[in-house]
């Protein structure tokens, strides 16, 4: 634990040391207690794939995978991630080999402006990992926390359905 001062003569703030697996690599980081995971990723680690949309957990643009589960990085404090495994959009591909969801998004043109795409893809990966996407209606409902201002929902759903089908899931 180290201390940071906000200005001369002000009370120092205690930072906290955390360790995590970030996109397959061990990281040791010092964070202030109020630092969100999103701000840590974007401002301290320069991983800007996760977007700051609403900053209130309503749009899903900041969705990442924390221990394989979908979370809104804007609502998650970085100190809560100590000891966790974190995957961002930057960590999904294996070298030049895209993750199946990334490839399906390209194939189905499941993005327009691209702003929401990293959050949509991470949410889709988490959704598939959950194993609850048994129909198009399930996918629609379970992806409802990720907004797309361009309205590419039908293409996003088609991309996810394809990966679910390939991985042995059912679809109706």
Image (cartoon, rainbow, N blue to C red):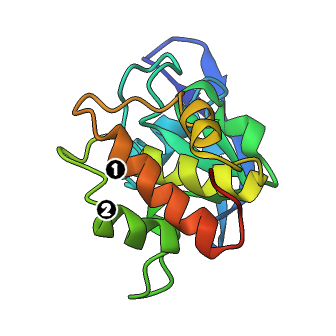
Q: Tag on residue 155?
A: 1
Vertical order, 62 against 57 (above or below): below
- Is residue 42 depicted above or below 53 in this figure? below
Residue 78 locus on image (x, y percent): 65, 38
| Residue occupying the point 82% across, 54% down | 83
Q: Position of residue 10 (x, y in %)?
A: 53, 11
Tags 1 and 2 touching, CB below 8 Å: yes
Instruction: Give the image location of residue 13, x and y in percent.
Output: 63, 23
The answer to which of 35 and 146 lies nearer the viewer is 146
> Going 40% across and 49% down the picture, which residue do you hit?
156
Furthest residue in direction right, as rendered: 83
**According to the image, label 2 marks what residue?**
108
The N terminus: image quadrant = top right
Front residue of 133 and 85 = 133
Judged from the image, the secondary structure of the residue bearing numbered disc 2 is loop
Q: Estimate how packed mark 2 is, as few (under 14), some (14 to 19) or many (20 or more) residues with alpha carbons within 10 Å.
A: some
Q: Distance between the residues labelled 1 and 2?
A: 6 Å
Depth check: give the residue in front, 80 or 55: 55
Q: Residue furthest front?
A: 172
Answer yes or no: is residue 45 visible: no
Across and down, in percent, residue 55 comes to: 44, 20
53 displayed left or right of 131: left
């Amino acid at each position: 634990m180290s201390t940071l001062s906000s200005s001369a003569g002000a009370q120092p703030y205690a930072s906290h040391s955390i360790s995590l697996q970030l996109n397959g690599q061990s990281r040791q980081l010092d964070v202030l207690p109020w630092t969100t995971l999103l701000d840590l990723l974007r401002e301290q680690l320069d991983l800007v794939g996760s977007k700051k949309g609403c900053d209130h957990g309503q749009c899903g643009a900041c969705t990442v995978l924390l221990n394989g589960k979908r979370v809104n990085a804007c609502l998650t404090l970085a100190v809560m991630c100590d000891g966790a495994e974190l995957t961002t959009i930057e960590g999904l591909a294996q070298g030049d080999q895209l993750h199946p969801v990334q490839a399906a998004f390209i194939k189905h043109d499941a993005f327009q402006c691209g702003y929401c795409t990293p959050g949509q893809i991470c949410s889709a990966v988490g959704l598939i990992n959950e194993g609850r996407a048994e129909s198009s209606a399930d996918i629609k409902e379970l992806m409802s926390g990720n907004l797309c201002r361009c309205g590419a929902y039908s293409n996003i759903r088609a991309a996810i359905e394809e990966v679910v089908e390939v991985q042995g899931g059912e679809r109706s």
